[in-house]
Amino acid sequence: MAQTITPNPSTVETETQYDVELRKVFKVFDGYTAVRGIDLDVRQGEFFSILGPSGCGKTTTLRLVAGFDEPTSGEVLLQGKSMVGVPPYRRPVNTVFQSYALFGHMTVWDNVAFGLRLKNRSKTDVQKAVGEALELVKMESFARRYPAQLSGGQQQRVALARALANQPTVVLLDEPLGALDLKLRKEMQVELSTLHRELGVTFIMVTHDQEEALSLSDRIAVMNEGRVEQIGTPSEIYELPATPFVADFIGETNLFQGYVAASDPALIKVETERGLAMLVKPTDACRGVAAEPVVVSVRPEKVRLSLEHPGSEMNCFEGRLRHTMYLGTHVHYVVDLPTGDMVTVMRPNRPERMPQLDTVVYVSWAASDALPLAAPPES
């Protein structure tokens, strides 16, 4: 029965592969530009996440798609049709909010049925749609309860059911799991992913949680200060960040600011502002132009930590172990280099001897594990 809730045929177009398109969209509030010339294409049936820190414009972008706000300039298209002047209730989208936005005086059943009744659907249609939606989110046995009688996770499931019951083409998720504790958030991530696979409906999720976006999304748009810094698959965003901001915001990384000191077709020598010299592989962002400013990103899991000089690594530096952090499955180490650079190392938690604080250690990484990025203008 789960597969019976599908997008309303009357809202589906076949002329475009995209359910949502944003074209050079700007949004200005009282002189403050929240969204700066965004271009986005969200494919049919895709789980697309908009990721970024607080205040970056991601929720505003979602509100522009939903119709709660109108662009100052630019255009929003749904299923290839311009949404200029189209109110939210006439758009083939439904929104799930972090606050759930359930009506406290209504039962679970009535909350899910609310939007259907507004559209004057027949009693038979309402009963069928509500029953299917509650079954999808495993809440059919709670139909006669009120929101105050439910846990946070159960309320979120009801909010999802209400959004799905209207058979939208696109489901918009605004920090949907942000109010849940860690364990419940993980469980709901699995449920969201399962629902998306079963339904084939387009999901667009706004979140500041990098792990959540990486684990759920087909593609991610990373936003910063109202702009899109990069769009790509989770692996592209993590392994090949386009900018220092993306590298730093997604997961953890070691960043070294410097310039190109020398190069050949296979290797580039970078010297940092503090005098550290390292070798990196050329990339599209850094071809090895002499004196070119660069920022080198090295993920902590790519860094090796040893008590003796490894000998074979292209980039190896002596330092002192200043801090350890036990995280269960992993241990984080922070090593202080003579230049003043701090290098973070992440290693799986294994039954082996851990170096003591203030011990002389060596950190090393391959040239292929150091990603040179174009330095931002302010660098």
Image: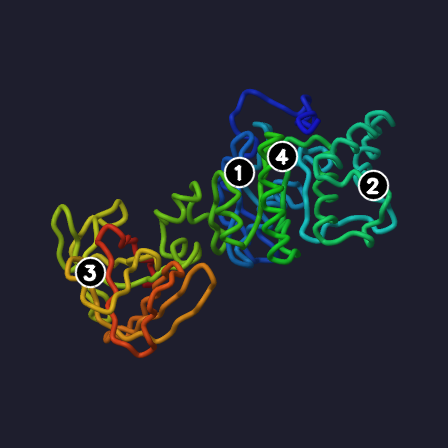
Quadrant of image for the C terminus = bottom left
Secondary structure category for the residue under label 4: strand
Q: Quadrant of residue 235?
A: top left
Mark 4 or mark 3: name the one nearer the start of the chain: 4
Q: Disc 4 marks which residue? A: 170
Q: How far separated are the C-alphas under marks 3 and 1?
A: 43 Å
The amino acid at mark 4 is Val
The amino acid at mark 1 is Leu
Label 3: few (<14), some or many (≥20) within 10 Å? Answer: some
- Cβ atoms under marks 3 and 2 closer than 8 Å: no
Q: How far separated are the C-alphas under marks 3 and 2?
A: 61 Å
Q: Quadrant of residue 310?
A: bottom left
Q: Where is residue 196? Give x, y as percent.
A: 60, 35
- Cβ atoms under marks 3 and 1 closer than 8 Å: no
Q: How far separated are the C-alphas under marks 4 and 1?
A: 14 Å
The amino acid at mark 3 is Asn
Give the numbered dot on residue 315.
3
Q: Disc 1 marks which residue? A: 22
The amino acid at mark 2 is Ala
Give the numbered dot on residue 143.
2
Q: How is the image coloured?
A: rainbow
Q: Is label 4 or label 1 in front? A: 4
